[in-house]
């Protein structure tokens, strides 16, 4: 596994890459909600953006994946637009990486059909997205095949580009592992065609806890701190954050380690002296939760001020985002189609795609 710090990281994979070549990495984001939260940002988006400078990066909006949960046309369209704007506003540079929409490159769906034959039903049943649903009480009658097949589409998304590393949050580790298994099973049969990618997960931020202080920050759990929502919404999210449950009064000595409000200060607050001072006072019982939260809110505003402004500018120029995605789709399709051709040829499907 490639462990990664928050900043630019050296990418190493299992496949040897000549030292002079940029290493290829890839990641996607599912527009299953209307906006990114700070868990997405520190766990995945920020590392991805940092990595775009020194690597050959492919990043895509996994719009087809969103269909597992979003089945209202207007909502889906809106989510897709938002996540594209969020990414660009946060610093994704389409000149430094290939940024595209999954559905713009049909090879993803075509490759999925092939890969489904190199994984067993039993293996798929052990995938956590499916198992979690069952554990939450869903019956198989209500779980759609899109969700069940999600890891196969994700394997297709990845393997088409032959990346050596996949920068993602901890919750995606299993999906990268099953991707490796599918590639391995395919290669065993046909020779070294597909590249086995490594998950690239930040030790510090691979699993950002939610405002409940227990579970992973997730939109579906409602324990998020947003990035681009109205300030009142962000303020409310921060003020509702759990702290030290054993502290009754502001004068009680409090616990800092594992306290979500301080986890968020460590992530967000660029004023490290302020964070140290707040921690000291918290331990001594000389600062109240409200002040700690208000200071976090102020830090959030500072940290995301530029991105919020950039987002407003980008929003006003829809044609520019369309241009960026068109260019990204062309570049992505060139690479993806080449792998698909190679795979088709390997398995014995010699069709018009393979004609020179
Ligand atoms: N809490 C998190 N900490 C670290 N990384 C996270 N990621 C998500 N939540 C955290 C990472 O963000 C990237 C995009 O994830 P996604 O498109 O799969 O979104 P998600 O996992 O569906 O995000 P949510 O909020 O958890 O959605 P729901 O509630 O719908 O399941 C991925 O790299 C992911 O690891």
Image (cartoon, helix red, strand yellow):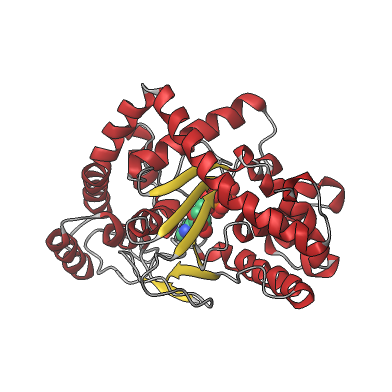
| Residue 221 in view in this figure | no
- Residue drawn at 40 percent across, 27 percent down: 320
Q: Please name the residue shown 24% across and 39% down the image.
A: 305
**54 vs 123, nearest the viewer:** 54
Question: Residue 307, how many percent across, how many down?
Answer: 29, 39
- Which quadrant would residue 179 be assigned to in this image? bottom right
Residue 91: name its quadrant. top left
Disc tally is: 0
Extreme right residue here? Answer: 141
Is residue 195 visible in this depiction of the protein? yes
Q: Residue at x 15, y 56 (%)?
A: 271
- 180 with respect to 58 (left or right): right
In the rendered image, the vertical position of residue 161 relative to residue 334, given as above or below: below
Where is residue 260? Give x, y as percent. 37, 61
Return the residue nearer the eye: 140 or 250.
Answer: 140
Residues 76 and 339: in front is 339
Q: Where residue 94 appears, x then y in whole percent?
A: 38, 42
Please provide percent x and percent y for residue 237. Answer: 39, 43
């Amino acid at each position: 596994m490639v462990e990664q710090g928050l900043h630019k990281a050296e990418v190493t994979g299992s496949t040897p890459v000549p030292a002079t070549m940029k290493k290829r990495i890839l990641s996607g984001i599912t527009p299953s909600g209307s906006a990114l939260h700070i868990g997405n940002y520190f766990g995945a988006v920020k590392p991805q953006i940092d990595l775009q400078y020194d690597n050959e990066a492919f990043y895509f909006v996994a719009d087809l994946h969103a269909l597992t949960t979003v089945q209202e046309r207007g909502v889906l369209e809106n989510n897709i637009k938002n996540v594209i704007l969020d990414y660009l506003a946060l610093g994704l540079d389409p000149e430094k990486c290939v940024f595209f929409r999954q559905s713009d490159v049909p090879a993803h769906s075509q490759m999925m059909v092939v890969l489904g034959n190199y994984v067993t039903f039993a293996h798929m049943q052990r995938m956590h997205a499916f198992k979690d649903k069952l554990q939450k009480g869903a019956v198989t009658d209500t779980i759609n095949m899109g969700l069940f097949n999600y890891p196969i589409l994700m394997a297709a998304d990845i393997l088409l580009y032959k990346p050596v590393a996949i920068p993602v949050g901890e919750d995606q580790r299993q999906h990268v592992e099953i991707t490796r298994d599918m590639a391995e099973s395919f290669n065993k049969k046909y020779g070294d065609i597909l590249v086995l990618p490594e998950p690239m997960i930040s030790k510090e931020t691979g699993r950002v806890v939610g405002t409940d202080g227990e579970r992973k920050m997730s939109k579906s759990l409602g324990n998020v701190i947003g990035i681009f929502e109205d300030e009142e919404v962000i303020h409310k999210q921060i003020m509702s954050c759990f702290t030290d449950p054993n502290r009754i009064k502001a004068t009680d000595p409090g616990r800092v380690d594992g306290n979500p409000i301080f986890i968020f200060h460590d992530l967000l607050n660029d004023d490290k002296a302020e964070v140290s001072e707040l921690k000291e006072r918290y331990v001594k019982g000389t600062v109240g939760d409200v002040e700690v939260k208000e200071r976090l809110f102020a830090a959030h505003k500072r940290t995301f001020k530029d991105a919020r402004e950039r987002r407003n500018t980008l929003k006003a120029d829809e044609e520019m985002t369309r241009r960026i995605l068109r260019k990204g789709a062309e570049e992505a399709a060139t690479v993806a189609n080449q792998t698909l051709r190679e795979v088709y040829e390997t398995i014995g499907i010699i069709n018009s795609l393979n004609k020179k």
